[in-house]
Image: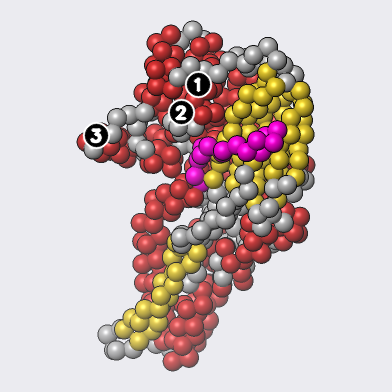
Amino acid sequence: MNHYRRYVMLGLTTLLLNGCASFSAGNLFSHYSAQNSDMYDAVASGRYADAAEDLSDDVIAGGILDNMERGRVYWLAQRYPQSMQAFDASDNAVQTLQNKATVSLSETAASVGALAANDNLSTYTPPDYELGFLHLYLGLNYLQKNNVEDAVVEMRRANAVQKKAREQREKELNAAQDKMSSEGISPNLGSVLAHYPNAGKTLDAVQNGYLFLLSGLLYETQGNLNDAYVDYRRALAVAPNNPTVIQATLRVAKALGMRQDFNQLKTRYGKPTILGDKQSRVIVIDEQGVVDALQGWQLSLPLYDSQGHMALYSVALPHYSEKNHPQLAPLMINGHSRQVAPLIDVNQMAVYNLNERMPVLLLRQAIRVLAKNELRKELAKQDQIGGLVMNIWNTLTEQPDTRSWMTLPAKVGTISRIVPAGEQTLTVAGHHYRFNIAAGNTVLVWMSRQGQQATLWHKQLGQLE
């Protein structure tokens, strides 16, 4: 009878694990970053086609994260239809997750299975900053196809994510503002104009200035200056020293006749740059490198029962290690080297998110150790082999939860230049990219650079104010 009991317990555990949507041998005995290391290295070195080939056909993290990675890799490899398909699949999976009113049997199994093995078997819930990037890349896919209307829809959805992220952290942001004020640091003008807390790096970590800038540019392209000004002010709150953001905010404040705002902006930043009769504007969005991948930290701890029997338990947690990111070659516009101004630091967003999640990860780790220990003791009552098997199981299956969108850029910067109308030449790592701008018009150049390679394209934004 006791043997049957042991087999039933093992069978139930196996059944629960197989109920997990992301159950696989890889997730059971490895972790996300390790399973995707070849793909990550290919992206980091600019081998986009190789990265696309390295994408796994298996379910690793589920429909949300797996498709985020596919969408981004296909995007860099300029396989745009596949990129859009993957991002749409991820978006649909997110909506399915958010619309669930009750916890399903499979989710319950996944939760219990994760406690029996590791958190890689639980349902992946993307953090706010990843959701914002999901809508950003959906928007860029539409823009690349010259569909500005649908691109703006995605920007509105992204802004809804941004608003929710800020509201959920209002208390912390206000505390950071109070601390900065007590240290004699005055609020930046963007925070004042946008009615945002002046929370310094804390605000940068939860609000994406890249999204705000792109959203403002698309609104301005449509002639919707009021919404453009709202997002430019928000971008200025996050990136108060970025010249592209500064000029856009000045430009639209003047066009809207916002005299008080415009005078404050002019006093702080100087007069806006005005296009001459034979001049045009180039705005470059420059994504750089690849965000750091989560690494695993493991430690084996001995636990003793009341009879003095010892069992080893592995404690495994994710962490970010310090990395030196390679210096990218300078950009040149019409033969002149141009400095890229920082806009956002995605690594900072990722670290902030991990710090927010760490208390929950620690709690689940403690619960899992207790659960595994109870199961081991129950099996050990039957025979020593059962206890030994559980010791091995505990050690092998405890894996850190390193799931994150690991193909995002590490940083994003911008360049904004007034140039003579006509043909323009952008030089990246020795490669020349040429395009034309009519007098009085603005062109947006989007690029993403990894290693010595770059993916880029340009779009005419028309005559901005």
**Given the current orientation, which residue lies at the most extreme front position?**
335
- Amino acid type assigned to the residue bearing label 3 in the image: Gly
In the image, what residue occupies the spot 67% across and 24% down?
A: 419
| Residue at the spot of label 1 | 249
Q: CA distance from mark 3 to mark 1?
A: 26 Å
Label 2 element class? helix
Instruction: Inspect this view and state whether residue 178 appears.
Output: no
Above or below: residue 464 compared with residue 131: above
To which quarter of the image does residue 340 belong? top right
Kind of residue at disc 1: Thr
In the rendered image, residue 451, in percent from the top left (x then y), is placed at 65, 54
The numbered disc on residue 10 is none
Mark 1 Cα-neighbour bin, 10 Å: few <14, some 14–19, many ≥20: many
Figure check: 225 above or below 282 = above
Residue that mark 2 sits on: 236
Q: Tell me where residue 36 appears, x and y as whole percent.
A: 63, 62
Sequence-earlier tag: 2 or 3: 3
316 versus 97 height, above or below:
below
Inter-mark Cα distance, 2 to 3: 20 Å
Callouts 2 and 1 close, C-beta under 8 Å: yes
Q: Depth-wise, is mark 2 or mark 3 nearer the camera?
A: 3
